[in-house]
Amino acid sequence: MAKGKLVLIIGPSGVGKSVILQALRERHPEFYFPKSATTRPRRKGEGDDLYYFVTDEKFDALVEEHKVLEWAVVHGGARYGTLVEEIIPRIEDGKVVVREVDVQGFDSIRNHHCFRGAGAPYILESIFILPESKEQLLEHIAERAPMEGQELKRRIASMEKELTYAEECSAKIVNKEGQLERTISQVEGVLKS
């Protein structure tokens, strides 16, 4: 059994995952934050710190060669994927690998042969970041991008589905309004355990 582990950070949009991950990156160089492969074009001024930018053909080849743990089509049709080479060698080196995924990515990774079942060769933990309340979460979503009608209904339905995954995770942490440091500290506790 490898000394390291993979820890997935999951939670609905607007709950604060990105802020938490940014703080962890800054404070914990001992953790590893893998890059994603993506087919979307590089944005102006964007470096290579978060993504491997690949063509559709290269992405197809990665999937075909089983070099991707999970992947999804995201806004606008671009694909994003978690690369095996970004995860497994780091776990084998004893690293704590921290990865944000959506619920589909969580399903794919926890059902992957590397992490599934009592005899799996690698440790998988998951942290679900919960809002203090659904109302608070909807306020955050509305602040980021005002929406109404069908888009708002779609977001609420998506949030409801995502929240059902909290019970499937190793740990649940509530990100209370105005208590971000407390939330980060709780996440650090899980990562270090």
Image (cartoon, rainbow, N blue to C red):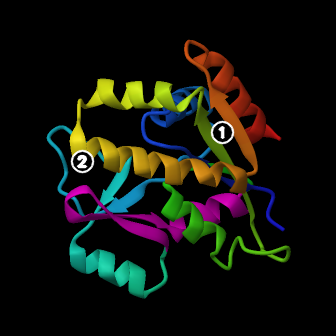
Image side of residue 117 versus residue 184, left or right:
right
Q: Which mark is residue 79?
A: none
Q: Quadrant of residue 75?
A: bottom left
Image side of residue 36 versus residue 98, left or right:
left
Element class at badge 2: helix
Q: Which residue ends up furthest to the top in the rendered image?
A: 178
Amino acid type for the residue under numbered disc 2:
Gln
Q: Quadrant of residue 88?
A: bottom right
Where residue 7 appears, as percent x and y from the top left, is 66, 51
Where residue 50 appears, as percent x and y from the top left, is 38, 47
> What residue is disc 2 on?
150
Where residue 29 appears, as percent x and y from the top left, is 60, 35
Q: Quadrant of residue 147?
A: top left
Image side of residue 119 versus residue 142, left or right:
right
The structure residue drawn at horizontal position 42% and vertical position 51%, both measured from the top left corner, is 158
User: In the rendered structure, which segment of residues is drawn in magenta?
Assistant: 69-93
Q: Which tag, 2 or 1, sits closer to the chain's start?
A: 1
Amino acid type for the residue under numbered disc 1:
Glu
Residue 162: within the magenta?
A: no
Which of labels 2 and 1 is toward the front? 2
Residue 83: within the magenta?
A: yes
Where residue 66 appears, as percent x and y from the top left, is 49, 83
Number of other residues with Cα within 10 Å of mark 1, as a class: few under 14, some 14 to 19, many 20 or more: few
Q: What quarter of the picture does the C terminus occupy?
A: top right
Number of other residues with Cα within 10 Å of mark 2, as a class: few under 14, some 14 to 19, many 20 or more: few
- Mark 2–mark 1 Cα distance, whole angstroms, equals 43 Å
Q: Which mark is residue 30?
A: 1
Residue 185 in view here: yes
Q: Is residue 94 above or below residue 153?
A: below
Element class at badge 1: loop
Residue 100 in view here: no
Q: Is residue 28 above or below residue 126?
A: above
